[in-house]
């Protein structure tokens, strides 16, 4: 018999076998070459071990003299049992020599009775077995299933124990390998295993991983072998850009050099796709690992000289930058001739090139499909999106409004221009990317042309209205009437928290309410039963706190401060039979350490039986305007001091919240001019003495002008001021200063006489809009949509189509059809009206791809988004004849889709 060599892993394995048979020490004889280059003495499981090569029986006898029952003696000899004789073998564990077969030890280590032949016939099988023995984890290997040790079980156990990859006996796919490779420990764990157990077992493990991971494994294996596991995902991301280059291009050659071999495009595509899937997951659950992957990918993009192809990637930051540059150019081209259009046709004509609008929308879609578009640190995308919204608005004609209809001007500001201001604030903040910045600047310039004309038209209507001394027009309230018309009636029926956010414009209110309703999902906006839109009021003039807030809280025209407000509020509540409490800034700021609100404020809100109305004045917005550094602020429910805890307290106590203001404001853009005026009451208001009203100003007089003897000049142009530079101003006559939002929100059921509000945003805010290039919009009516016999649109100033086209007539034809009448007669308890069904059909027929987001669909029905799912089911019962999906939800559940061909077929109407 030819003796083989013994190895340290085999010796340890044989000792473990002896220990499993209750031996704590003794002599283990191994039939092997009497050679040993390992340590002569070492410890195994804290027991000393001594290894002695013995070339003869006499040498074995001499070695036995040093044996001890409390330690292990390992004898290596090539003499067989016949040469040794019973006198020697009787002293050995098992009374025989052991064969140094590492696979036998491996089999025993896995608790198996059989070995898969693929293991023992692999290249360098003995080294492979020794590698498994050396790599045995502290707790041992997971037992092989059914007693058969297969390569899958052996290598998955090894990968799990030594690399932290997958689980013993479990499946390992390309996604798992790539996810593992993205962590810092991946490279070191492979190096540690190579150092511990040798090259043979590591190479075999990597080959197994390559076979288990399909096409991606062919690309990743070379990186793992070379110790570059952490490049597997970043280089996979860059591969997407490389695939866009020509076959023999530089990037492809450099990629081959990185991998050491040429790989087919299907393999590269699979690698890129798997890397993108893993990165998507990392962006959600491990931001640090994602940051490393993306940063390394940018470096590799340069290494492969593939930067010019980055826009093909939906993950590389440079790809997002490229897509944003494309969007910026599309925005610039769409709006660059706005001034020419305005001079030729007026600022209310379409100021954006309608033919270029599809390119803008496509570019935006490409941006938003990028994985980093919604990243919290990515500020460019929201600003670009805001510019697209402005471009949609500019593509729509806006009919000039008559000066005598102040309510129409107020409604236009609330329903459109305030949202324009909100988008413009985002766009104005700007970006550092040259291409996108140029597009944003061009859009802003175009938007200002129209917005400035609307401001001047509003101011003229305001001056006429105040001069005539008329009551508040239509559904618009004078600010001093809000307590009597809205707040106190609500407080008599249900406890109310009135929040006065000093300086909050209609634009800021839209942002704050959206945050409350959409992000926190704990509040629902309400409107009066016969209205669709949130309330508005006219601030006192000049639009200053001393007259506007005091008049609001006193319920009458007053000029004063906090003392007058407290007295007037108390008298107003007493007269209405309501117990009220008013808190200004000092008591709100006087909370104890560790408490968000003062105990007095919390107690008043909790006392729903004794205090029907709690009013709180929040000064955050107005204080921000008084800073010396100009700049807009993105407002939400969290960055207005005290607002979140007040809302939480109101929700706990079940109070209705009325969120309003005393006046709005305009933002300083560092583009304006200053007039030195003696006797100016603010940066935006001055007396009529001296310089007469000039361009960008308006003269107002009447009972509601409480300063300057009832006759004042107010700045209208947002770029005009009369004092020192600040962050923003109020006091003037622009609608952003005069129009005060009155928002009613409930944490539960709507108050009696109120209903949940339909979406308040305009359609151009929510998504792409259909625009008729030749449309001449009719003058909008100032009446409430719900007060009319027939409701033609979900908002007051959405531009109405000039005349129904045959395609739009489909809605009328469907509802008039006999099939629809049959469906209606069969549908029990369907509350949706025919008018609502027609409105939804018209909106879907006009929408791109006949697809509407849920919010827009709810708006077309005139209902709140929270009610849409139930309403959609009712409409489907009417339209989906015999369950055919005429109207269905998109796969993502966030949109509604109309199948027009099926609609025509089921209802037997011609398109």
Image (tube, grey):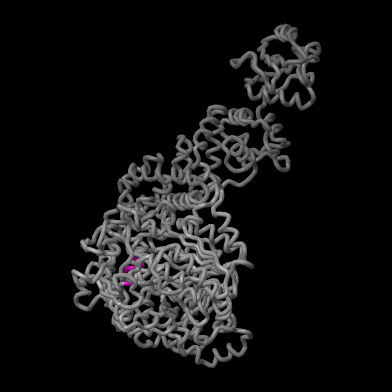
In the figure, residue 581 lies in which quadrant? bottom right
Q: Tell me the residue at 69%/19% (across/down).
A: 31
Q: Is residue 390 part of the magenta span, yes or no?
A: yes
- Most prominent secondary structure in the magenta stretch? helix
Q: Which residues are magenta?
A: 387-393
Which of the image's four quarters has the N terminus?
A: top right
Residue 623 position within the rendered picture, expressed as x and y whole percent measured from the top left? 39, 57
Residue 47 appears in view: yes
Which of the image's four quarters has the C terminus?
A: bottom left
Of 500 and 215, the residue lying toward us: 500
Residue 100 position within the rendered picture, expressed as x and y whole percent measured from the top left? 67, 23
Q: Is residue 506 part of the magenta span, yes or no?
A: no
Residue 351 is left or right of residue 117, and the answer is left
Q: Tell me the residue at 32%/66% (across/down).
A: 731
Q: Tell me the residue at 21%/61% (across/down).
A: 676
Residue 257 is left or right of residue 77, and the answer is left
């Amino acid at each position: 018999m030819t003796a083989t060599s013994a190895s340290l892993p085999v010796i340890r394995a044989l000792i473990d076998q002896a220990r499993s048979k209750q031996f704590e020490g003794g002599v283990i004889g191994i039939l092997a070459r009497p050679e040993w280059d390992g340590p002569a003495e070492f410890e195994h499981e804290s027991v000393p071990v001594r290894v002695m090569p013995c070339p003869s029986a006499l040498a074995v006898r001499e070695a036995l003299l040093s044996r001890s029952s409390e330690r292990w003696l390992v004898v290596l000899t090539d003499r067989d049992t016949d040469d040794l004789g019973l006198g020697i073998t009787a002293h050995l564990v098992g009374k025989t020599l052991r064969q140094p077969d590492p696979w036998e030890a491996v089999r025993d280590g896995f608790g198996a009775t059989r070995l898969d032949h693929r293991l023992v016939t692999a290249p360098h099988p003995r080294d492979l077995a020794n590698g498994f023995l050396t790599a045995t984890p502290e707790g041992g290997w997971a037992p092989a299933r059914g007693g058969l040790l297969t390569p899958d079980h052996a290598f998955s156990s090894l990968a799990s124990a030594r690399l932290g990859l997958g689980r013993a006996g479990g499946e390992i796919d390309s996604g798992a390998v790539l996810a593992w490779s993205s962590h810092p420990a991946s490279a070191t764990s492979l190096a540690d295993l190579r150092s511990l157990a040798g090259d043979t077992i590591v190479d075999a493990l990597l080959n197994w991983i390559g076979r288990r991971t399909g096409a991606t494994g062919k690309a990743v294996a070379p990186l793992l072998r070379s110790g570059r596991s952490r490049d597997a995902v970043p280089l996979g991301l860059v591969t997407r850009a490389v695939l866009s280059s020509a076959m023999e291009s530089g990037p492809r050659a450099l990629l081959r050099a990185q991998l050491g071999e040429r790989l087919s495009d299907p393999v590269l595509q699979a690698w890129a796709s798997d890397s993108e899937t893993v990165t998507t997951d990392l962006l959600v659950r491990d931001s640090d690992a994602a940051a490393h992957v993306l940063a390394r990918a940018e470096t590799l993009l340069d290494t492969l000289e593939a930067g010019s192809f980055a826009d093909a990637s939906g993950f590389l930051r440079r790809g997002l930058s490229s897509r944003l540059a494309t969007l910026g150019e599309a925005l610039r081209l769409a709006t660059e001739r706005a001034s020419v259009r305005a001079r030729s046709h007026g600022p209310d004509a379409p100021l954006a090139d309608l033919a270029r609008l599809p390119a803008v929308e496509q570019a935006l879609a490409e941006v938003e499909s990028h994985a980093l578009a919604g990243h919290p640190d990515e500020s460019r995308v929201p600003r670009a999106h805001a510019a697209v919204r402005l471009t949609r608005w500019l593509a729509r004609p806006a009919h000039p409004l008559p000066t005598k209809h102040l309510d129409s001007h107020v409604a236009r500001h609330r329903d459109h221009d305030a949202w324009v201001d909100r988008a413009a604030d985002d766009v104005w903040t700007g970006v550092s990317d040259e291409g996108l910045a140029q597009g944003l600047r061009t859009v802003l310039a175009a938007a200002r042309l129209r917005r400035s004309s609307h401001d001047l038209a509003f101011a003229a209507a305001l001056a006429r209205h105040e001069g005539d001394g008329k009551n508040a027009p239509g559904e618009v309230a004078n600010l001093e009437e809000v307590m009597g018309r809205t707040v106190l009636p609500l407080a008599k029926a249900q406890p109310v928290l009135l929040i006065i956010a000093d300086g909050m414009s209609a634009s800021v209110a839209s942002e704050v309410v959206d945050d409350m309703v959409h992000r926190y999902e704990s509040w629902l906006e309400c409107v009066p039963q016969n209205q669709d839109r949130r309330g508005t009021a006219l601030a006192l003039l000049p639009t200053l706190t001393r007259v506007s807030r005091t008049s609001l809280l006193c319920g009458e025209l007053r000029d004063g401060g906090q003392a007058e407000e407290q007295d007037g509020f108390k008298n107003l509540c007493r007269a209405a039979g309501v117990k009220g409490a008013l808190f200004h800034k000092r008591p709100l700021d006087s909370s104890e350490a560790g408490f968000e609100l003062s105990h007095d404020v919390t107690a008043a809100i909790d006392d729903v039986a004794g205090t029907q109305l709690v009013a709180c004045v929040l000064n955050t917005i107005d204080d921000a305007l008084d800073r010396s550094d100009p700049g807009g602020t993105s407002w939400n429910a969290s960055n207005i001091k005290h607002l979140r805890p007040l809302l939480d307290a109101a929700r706990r106590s079940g109070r209705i919240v009325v969120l309003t203001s005393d006046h709005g404001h305009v933002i300083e853009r560092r583009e304006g001019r200053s007039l030195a005026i003696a006797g100016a009451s603010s940066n935006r208001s001055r007396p009529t003495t001296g310089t007469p009203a000039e361009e960008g100003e308006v003269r107002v007089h009447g009972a509601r002008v409480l300063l300057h003897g009832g006759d004042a000049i107010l700045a209208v142009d947002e770029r005009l001021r009369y004092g020192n530079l600040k962050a923003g101003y109020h006091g003037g006559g622009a609608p952003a200063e005069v129009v005060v939002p009155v928002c009613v929100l409930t944490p539960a059921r709507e108050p009696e006489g109120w209903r949940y509000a339909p979406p308040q945003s305009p359609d151009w805010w929510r998504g792409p809009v259909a625009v008729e290039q030749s449309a001449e919009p009719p003058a909008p009516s100032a009446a409430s949509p719900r007060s009319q016999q027939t409701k033609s649109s979900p908002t007051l100033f959405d531009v109405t189509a000039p005349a129904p086209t045959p395609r739009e007539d489909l809605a009328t034809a469907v509802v008039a059809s006999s099939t629809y009448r049959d469906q209606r007669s069969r549908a029990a308890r369907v509350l949706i009206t025919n008018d609502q069904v027609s409105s939804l059909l018209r909106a879907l027929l006009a929408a791109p791809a006949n697809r509407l987001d849920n919010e827009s669909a709810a708006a077309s029905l005139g209902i709140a988004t929270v009610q849409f799912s139930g309403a959609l089911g009712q409409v489907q019962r009417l339209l989906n004849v015999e369950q055919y999906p005429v109207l269905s939800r998109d796969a993502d559940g966030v949109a509604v889709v109309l199948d027009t061909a099926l609609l025509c077929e089921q209802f037997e109407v011609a398109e």
